[in-house]
Amino acid sequence: MVASERGIQYIIDDGLLVKGNEVIAGVSAKRAPTKIETVKKALYQNPEEANIIKKALRKDKAENIMLLGTSDNMVKKIAENLGLPAISETIYIADVATEDEMAEAKRTRMTEGKHVIPVPTFEIKKDFSGYLLDPLQIFKTKGKDVKPYIAEKSIIRPTFSYLGNYTISDTVFRQIIEYLANKVDAIHKIHRVRIDKLTEGMYIYIEIIVNYGHNVVDTLTEFKKKLKKEIENLTAMNVEKVSVVAKSLHVPDELRTQ
């Protein structure tokens, strides 16, 4: 909201360089394994990581940038490590948020281990596959005649959260796949499922037996789309690829005898 009011296109937050609603460079510090590593990444103490952001800023010829930090010293360090000019204006959270909003943000962070990243969920889902990841719709207005601020942000639970990570058994994925397959008339049954969990997301390989009398190509194309959407919604895992192979054909007994 502050960036929007001041016409600022670029935001640097916890390792990410955001332009508008798009991540254009960097990796979120929230993926670091410890709080210490998170702080180092957020400050761009690694020259290689800092150079990636510098290169992106030069390429875009960014004229104004907002740095997000938890202290004056932190944003000063970020500016120094990225070779940015001296900070021209400082806005404190108390200047733009109410006491209730700040208290709720602190409660959520301390008790649920959740943090907000200033981009829509689809922008970072690939980077946070397997983490708690939910969209957050923000609607804020400052008065009747002032244009409201509307945006989608993302809530994530970082790797270092004391609440720990969660894992999902392959059996769960198979059960979801079988449940969805049972709703498709053209699919007789699931023959085999293989799940590969990689950094960028999941690769799902499925072999099915199809029922005679259906358009196999159209059926499997639609099944793949629905499967990807449902697994991502139910598990917060990014599905990178789904392969569905029609292994054999099931012909009902009554048709065989005709």
Image (cartoon, rainbow, N blue to C red):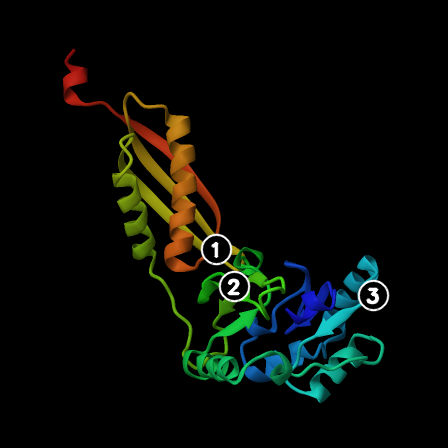
Q: Which residue is mark 2?
A: 128
Q: Counting residues from the N terminus, which is met first, the one under dot 1 or under dot 2?
A: 2
Callout 1: SS: loop
Q: Residue at x 70, y 67 (%)?
A: 5
Marks 1,2: beta carbons within 8 A: yes
Q: Residue at x 42, y 72 (%)?
A: 165
In the rendered image of this protein, does residue 115 appear above or below residue 20?
A: below
> Residue 80 at x, y = what percent?
80, 80
Q: Nearer the viewer, residue 224 or 171?
A: 224
The picture quadrant where one finds residue 76 is bottom right
Question: What amino acid type is highlighted by mark number 3?
Answer: Glu
The picture quadrant where one finds residue 64 is bottom right
> Residue 151 at x, y = what percent?
57, 61
Q: Residue at x 60, y 67 (%)?
A: 118
Q: Which residue is mark 1?
A: 238
Q: Is residue 192 left or right of residue 55?
A: left
Question: What amino acid type is highlighted by mark number 1?
Answer: Asn
Q: Is residue 114 left or right of residue 187?
A: right
Q: Which residue is mark 3?
A: 63
In the rendered image of this protein, does residue 79 appear above or below residue 122?
A: below
**Of tags 3 and 2, which is closer to the observer?**
3
Q: CA distance from mark 1 to mark 3?
A: 34 Å
- Which mark identifies residue 199? none
Q: Residue at x 77, y 80 (%)?
A: 89
